[in-house]
Amino acid sequence: MPGYRSTPIGPSVRVPRGLPVAPSSGSAESTAGYFRPDIEGLRGIAVLLVVVFHAAPNLLGGGFVGVDVFFVISGFLITGLLYRELRRSGRISFPGFYVRRVRRLFPAAALALAATFLLSAAVISPLELPRVSGDGVAAALSVSNIRFALASGDYFAAITDPSPFLHFWSLSVEEQFYLIWPALLLIVFRLGRGTRAVALTVALVALVSLLLAVVLTDVAASWAFYSLPTRAWQLALGGLLAIAAMRRSGSSSHARVLAIVGWIGVGAVLLAGIAFDDTLAYPGYWALLPTIGAAAIIAGGDRRGGAGMLLGRRPMRFFGRISYALYLWHWPLLILPVIAFGDALTVGARVGLVALAILVATLSTLLVEEPIRRGSRPGAARKNLALAGGPLLGLALAVLVGVTATGWVTDTAIAESLRGETASRGETASDAGPGRGAGRGAQGAPTSTPSTGPNVRATAKPGIPAEATRRPKPRRSTEPTAKPTAAPTPKPRRTPKPTPVIHLPADVRPSVWDAADDVEALVPNGCLHKEDLTSPRPCSVGASGARVVIALVGDSHASHWYPALRKVALDRGWRLETFVKVSCPFTDIPVRNLELKRRYRECEAFNENVVGALRRLQPDVVVTALSRWQHPIDEADESSVAQGNGMARMLKRVPGRKVIIADVPYPGFDVPGCLAKNIKDIRHCAVPAGGRVSGGSPLRERTAARASGGAMLDFSKVICGGNQDCPVVNDDMIVFRDHHHLTATFAKSMAPQLDRALQRLLKKRGR
């Protein structure tokens, strides 16, 4: 799947970015024109898979396969409807088709959009409101799948909170399908002069789309997951079923075989839901199991003795009936509380929110969806659509404008608040000295250690992540409360002086609004190589004839040190060459790419080419740094010692002195977003002391330095000031631009420390 972004909904729970799915939007009516209770029940199973997966992914890691089931159902119902009309009249009534689609989909979606906009405006960080508004716009325009494919494909996309509109991606896929499919079938029918051409075309679409999905899953997983061309085969497979269903066999033996096939399909879907998880390269070949399983259920579910015995039961049909509304409501109801409070939801809270989603979905179905869909005559469709849907559309658009405006208003309000806070303390930009209001004491140490603060899980995706920002819980006062007494009141004891809060400096650099985009120059100029590149392009700064040449190698955690190294090189008259690649550690250990969901072959080829380039370059110093997460293919390489030795073996292959920079402290939350929420006391955004080191760092770097004969540099005390919680604002500079990368501004400020370390190293060589 496309780069997942993880969100803590329960303890030790990850919710992969991009998995909310849309149920089939058609009714459970078969191509033969009669009601199929088994299909309605199948929709119930599909939506339950998705809801349970989102509420408790550890319980049902493959529940995301519900999307595959929904797509097959949609393809079956919509193709059957269109194909039957073509056979009957030789044409398709486009106005009638689209009016039915709008009446079926729009009212409930508009209501959910409006409510999600309002709730999001109340709980989401001011920094995130413009992005969330954009997500809502994309959802309203049925292009959210394209928006999320673009965002998750960008390694540096600043999407740190899961979007409350994320689940609209699959609805966008279906709506794009509705725009193309009727016209395609009609054109083929007219040009091919018959229904046989339609069947062959649907089969061809299924084959080409499946091949495209398999290929793109390996090289562009985000697009493979989100796009219509790579999902069309699932819709087309359902369409082939609809065409085949026009000619039913009266053979009882045939019916018995299909009944068995239906039960096998139920087993396939449930197996995928239980056995799959977010580590699979999805959809790819893996999607064949639940997709073919869903097709088998539809093919045999209504036969006597078939899966319809289970699927046609009232509980399954109930969830199938509310599946569309439940899809619309369950995701924002589950994710917005996490964003608002920042804490992983308890089991009780998750159960309660799921129950609330079912209640809201039931009311939406009974009061909005079904009355509008069924309460008007076909001839009055447009009139009823305007009467019922118009106000909801106006409400959704009004809230959209309001939320967008809220982002601008909040921007202005925070700026005014910062100026007001500074003025109230009697400070100006000139007299707010280093560290003042920056979450550090005289030596850069925090004046207090907050008991709570942002603390969320690491993202697994290039994706993306995605973390929710934790708001601190209110502390209980430790001040004793006097009990009423008839005796004279004793003289009150002096209470400890409260710890002063630490405000966000008014002149903080970069500004909260610009911090996410404060990246090193290697990012926009393409010198931080993307996943698909295997040969390093020339990227250098400084004179070509410089007496000292420094090479920077590694992943994005090497790249974010570039501003400091660049300043050192220019000040000293040295030359700096860079060889950095996204998620590609400089090691000989094979690693897995979480975006591509497979062995990172491009990284292995890139590192080999870097070794060749460094041997030709003959640098004086090779500097490397890498993220604390390596994701090795072999479990034997999970330890810090094994990974350190892997780095050392690679470093020994290249010339020059070796410098390994230990990984930076790890916040694990969106730092600019947290600061925007806590401008009056930024201590709440401090990185807990335990969060500084994770996954063995810097043991890994020490091992690499010792085994390669190099030097290790650890700047964590410079960044944090001691062993206490680490502030994220240092000397009026925001340290992190996201949840683990340094801002270019702060990285550049580290140039003096890096310069001294390199000077000591070079003096040992007589330079």
Image: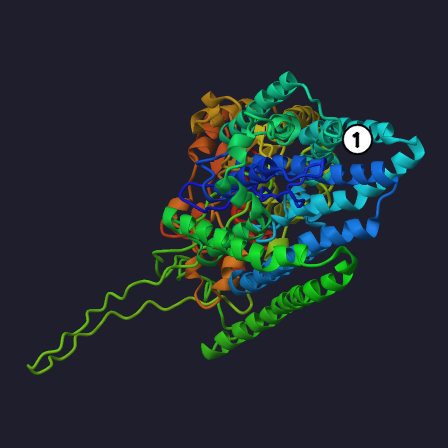
In this image, 669 relative to 256: left or right?
left
Q: Which residue is mark 1?
A: 202
Question: What scheme was used to colour the molecule?
Answer: rainbow
Which is nearer the eye, 276 or 626?
Answer: 276
> In which quarter of the view is residue 302 placed?
top right
Query: How many residues crowd mark 1 within 10 Å: few (<14), some (14–19), many (20+)?
Result: many
> In which quarter of the view is residue 419 placed?
bottom right
Tag 1: amino acid: Val
Farthest residue to the top: give it: 253
Indicate the position of residue 192 as horizontal and vertical percent values: 91, 31
In the picture, which quadrant includes the C terminus? top right
Indicate the position of residue 599 as horizontal and vertical percent values: 60, 25
In this image, 382 relative to 424: left or right?
right
337 up-or-down from 309: above or below:
below
- Identity of the residue drawn at 11% across and 81% down: 489
Residue 539 appears in the picture as rendered: yes
Residue 62 appears in the picture as rendered: no
Indicate the position of residue 589 as horizontal and vertical percent values: 54, 23
In this image, 16 relative to 183: left or right?
left
In the picture, which quadrant includes the N terminus? top right
392 up-or-down from 252: above or below:
below
- Identity of the residue drawn at 52% across and 65% down: 122
